[in-house]
Amino acid sequence: MILKELKHLHFSGIKGVGMTALALYAQDRGCLVTGSDVPDIFVTQEILVKRKIPLSLGFDASQVAEKTQALIYSGAFPDNPQIAKARNLNIPAMSYGQALGDLTQDKRVVATSGVGGKSTTAAMIASILEEAKLHPSFVIGVGNIPVLGVPGKYTAGGKIAVVEADEYAADPQHDATAKFLYLKPELIVVTNIDFDHPDVYANLDETLIAYEKFAERLTDNGLLLVNLDNPNVQKLLTRLSQSLRDRVVSYGFSPQAQWQIGQFRQLEGKTEFEISIKGVRLGMELSLPGKFNAANATASIAAATHLGVSQARSIDALKKFSGTLRRFQRLGSVNGVEVWDDYAHHPNQIRATLTAAKSWFGDKKLIAVFQPHTYSRTKALFADFAKALSLAEQTVITDIYASAREKRDDSISGELLARETKQYNRNTAFVTRKALLSYLKDSTKAGDVVMSLGAGDIYQIMNDFMSQK
């Protein structure tokens, strides 16, 4: 472990959800943690202030001093001068993915992966292990996990680290290695596989190759826990060696799943379902909506069972689980309008979230407010986005939130996506981010439900909407 004995780590791009969680983990290990980032407000702002982590604005090379023992950087910012400065001073410079792998080498790693559900599933597993007094460490890329109090934590006495495992490139400009390939997990959860990163993978096949390599990273006694409902997961299984297939455990609504979900009912404020495993039926109740969360919970119980936690204890822990920030999160209500927020940024996530929302909210009018995330994803999945977004009674699409890692592409826009969506749902409008708050004030009434969707900063508009008199 390169970072094990180091006491001063600087996190460049610390406001990112994964970076913040890892910074908290490092701080718990006894490290002095400092950070730098852009001045924009991020969902991690509150926890960074609470933990009193010194934060510099911008990426000026002077922020990396000789006393800095290692630089951990986000791949979201190309040509970061702090990386060059660290290397000039012979200070180790590691991407987030490399650092996560390094800092968890002394733990039994449980890694959750997939386009949707990996954060919630990781948070559920960590919550179960905490309830079972196994003192888990965890690094989960969300703003916060209310039932745990933090998104990242290191516990010296515990043997297990639960981490969110991402297939995106560790450093798109210089290191195309998938972040999760720096991990050495004992247990891998694959919630689903989809074509989600057209800027680093040319097609679905390349994405499947990355997951195949990830499965090969399992320890000798490792377990591969997969959602059999996802067709691309089924494709992955056909590509694995026989020795890996022998270590697969499946879950889902599929009749072929070993942990099979059935008797699903969504009621007001709760979800009920059964899990059948080896002839035993487990009754489940969640305060979260959707079949996708039933699947996440099932994966969590199966993972915890492998780790030695009784199923009864896991079920009790999940009854208390209230979700994470930006995952089907209720922000509150204003003037009789309910306001919710979700991180969904892929068509399949949006489809699942809106389907669950329509059932959860019953007869209330559902207004979806979508902020597309990245030009490349919006362009590659254009028609799929339009079809998924049409599920809401009213759809509002705003400007594309561009990642710092990509260049502007004027051939695609939120306005073009709104036109396409309108073919499937006439009650669709394009509204600029600048005009969005005013639009929501004028077009909503008591009894409506407004749900923001997207991986950018759309939640900030919802918070502003909530603060109106």
Image: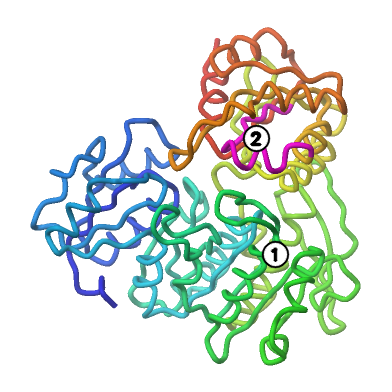
The quarter of the picture where residue 450 lies is top right
| Relative to 357, residue 19 above or below | below
Q: Nearer the viewer, residue 250 or 147?
A: 250
- In percent of width and height, residue 274 lies at 84, 66
For the C terminus, the quadrant is top right
Coloring scheme of the render? rainbow
- In percent of width and height, residue 173 lies at 41, 52
Q: Residues within 10 Å of mark 2 (few under 14, many from 20)?
A: many
Q: Secondary structure at mark 1?
A: helix
Which stretch appears magenta? Answer: 368-383
Residue marked by disc 1: 205
Q: Is residue 133 magenta?
A: no
Query: What residue is at 53 percent from the left and 71 percent from the top?
Result: 129
Badge 2 vs badge 1, beta-carbon distance below 8 Å: no
Residue type at mark 1? Asp
* Alpha-carbon span between mark 2 and mark 1: 27 Å
Residue type at mark 2? Leu
Query: What residue is at 74 percent from the left and 23 percent from the top?
Result: 418
Residue marked by disc 2: 453
- In percent of width and height, residue 457 lies at 51, 32
| Relative to 306, residue 449 above or below | above
Q: Secondary structure at mark 2?
A: strand
Q: Nearer the viewer, residue 204 or 148?
A: 204
Query: What residue is at 87 percent from the left and 53 percent from the top?
Result: 265
| Relative to 32, residue 305 above or below | below
Q: Seen from this angle, which residue lies furthest left?
A: 66
Q: Nearer the viewer, residue 424 or 411?
A: 411
Q: Residues within 10 Å of mark 1 (few under 14, many from 20)?
A: some
- 95 to the left or right of 401: left
- 176 to the left or right of 239: left
